[in-house]
Amino acid sequence: MTNVGLRLATVAAVVLLASPHWAPPAFAVTPPAIDNSLLPPPAPPAPPQPTEQREVCAVPVGSQTALSATQLAGFDMPAIWRLTRGAGQRVAVIDTGIAAHRRLSNVIAGGDYVSAGEGTRDCDGHGTIVAGIIAAAPDPTDTTGFTGIAPEAALIAIRQSSNKFGPLADPSSRGFGDVATLAMAVRTAADMGASVINISSIACAETTLDDRTLGAALSYAVDVKDAVVVAAAGNVGGDGQCPRQNTATQPTVIASPAWYDDYVLTVASIDSAGAPSEFSLHGPWVDAAAPGEHVVSLDPDGDGVIDTMPTPIGTASIAGTSYAAPLVSGLAALIRARFPRLSARQVMARIETSAHHPAGGWNTAVGAGVVDPLAALSDHTVSPSPLEPQPRGPAVPADPVRDRPHGIAATSAALCVAGLIAAASVRLRRRPEDVPAD
């Protein structure tokens, strides 16, 4: 995060101080200054304008045999769960909603900014997959081995965006949800007592964003309500995703809410070998990384699990920074359950300092490195080993400490979910005859 030194000072001896060699660099691209007067007022969740469903809802297809859940394979879950399972924590999932599933028994209706509802419908399928990664209960009959990382945490379901709906006043528009509704949803989640807020939808732009209401909401959530905000870094390479990769020292693609680095723990994706995912957007705001490829999670249209979803050309493996972020949100819930006196900023600092730091130091691909849940939950965190293997392609150099001079934003942007199907945008389909009332 941007203010690493400040966070670490508050953690005291529980977490080791980060060495300067992995500290993040200074960049001129900055979000607008926080203006608390722009904080959305408290109000019951509702669409800001009339909407209608434009596409049939999602239904997963593909084989559910011989699946193997690998997201948690590198973590000692029995040892982690001897310490905590996340009981007493509320994790807000600001996404496309959470569908009812037998392995999600503690879901709190948080509201709907897309259509009439309470957040407990998921026409896109995305939010249910995210929710499962956080808190799906273990199932001894599930041969895949899939489980959520914090199975005793409660979930607050807030539907904030959907690719299946559009504004009634604009028949040509596809998709609904932007930084304004995201700001409202963050305020709602914070007011509902969320100790952790997961955001797997991002806005990408090549110029500037007018997301000052979102900045105010993030400041409110972290500094007033003491919530940990975890966000996906964003994806590159698909329709509706970020337009290009940031390859130079100065980023050319802005990602929100990620660039509000003082308030958001931004998560990149790695593959099963520990290397940065090719689709994961780089940036000076990246704080840590977690597995985000070959994802297994809950079926949003059934009672089992899935590892594939439809694409325009068939089916492919579920992947994306969307699915790396909830793993870290679940970790944050575990930390808050085990160490209830830690503040939100202390929790974020603990996750970063206990990560497996890249051998070359902090970089824009994985930030401080791959998260280590057991180290983050230990009474005395130890300095982890460097990230292995080394990232594919040219090494990303380490840089000196970042600062945050404030900039000015100009335009608004719509949101896209940060989930990929084999590095393509999520395009889920449901048979026309199966469209539920929504």
Image: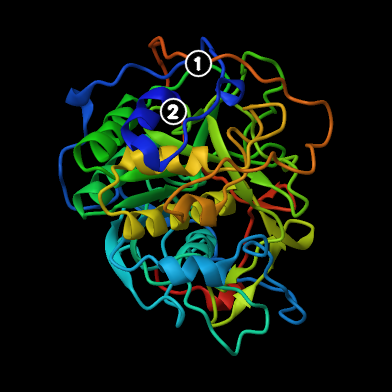
Q: Residue at x 22, y 54 (%)?
A: 193
- Name the side, left or right, on which 169 lies relative to 385: left
Q: Residue at x 70, y 63 (%)?
A: 310
Q: Residue at x 28, y 66 (%)?
A: 88
Graded by Cα atoms within 10 Å as few (under 14), some (14 to 19) or many (20 or more), the crowding at tag 1 reads: some
- Name the side, left or right, on which 16 lies relative to 245: left
Query: Are circles 2 and 1 on residues that touch, CB within 8 Å?
Result: yes
Q: Against 272, is 121 above or below?
A: below
Q: Against 92, is 18 above or below?
A: above
Query: What amino acid is at disc 1?
Result: Arg
> What label sits on residue 286 in the rendered view?
none
Q: Residue at x 79, y 43 (%)?
A: 389
Q: Give x and y (percent) for residue 112.
A: 31, 57
Using the rendered image of the protein, determine whether residue 48 is visible from the camera's viewpoint: no
Tag 1 secondary structure: loop
Q: Give x and y (percent) for residue 180.
A: 33, 36
Q: Give x and y (percent) for residue 209.
A: 44, 22
- Please give the residue where the numbered disc 1 appears in the rendered image: 402
Using the rendered image of the protein, determine whether residue 33 is visible from the camera's viewpoint: yes
- Please give the residue where the numbered disc 2 appears in the rendered image: 261
Give the mark toward the camera: 2 or 1.
1
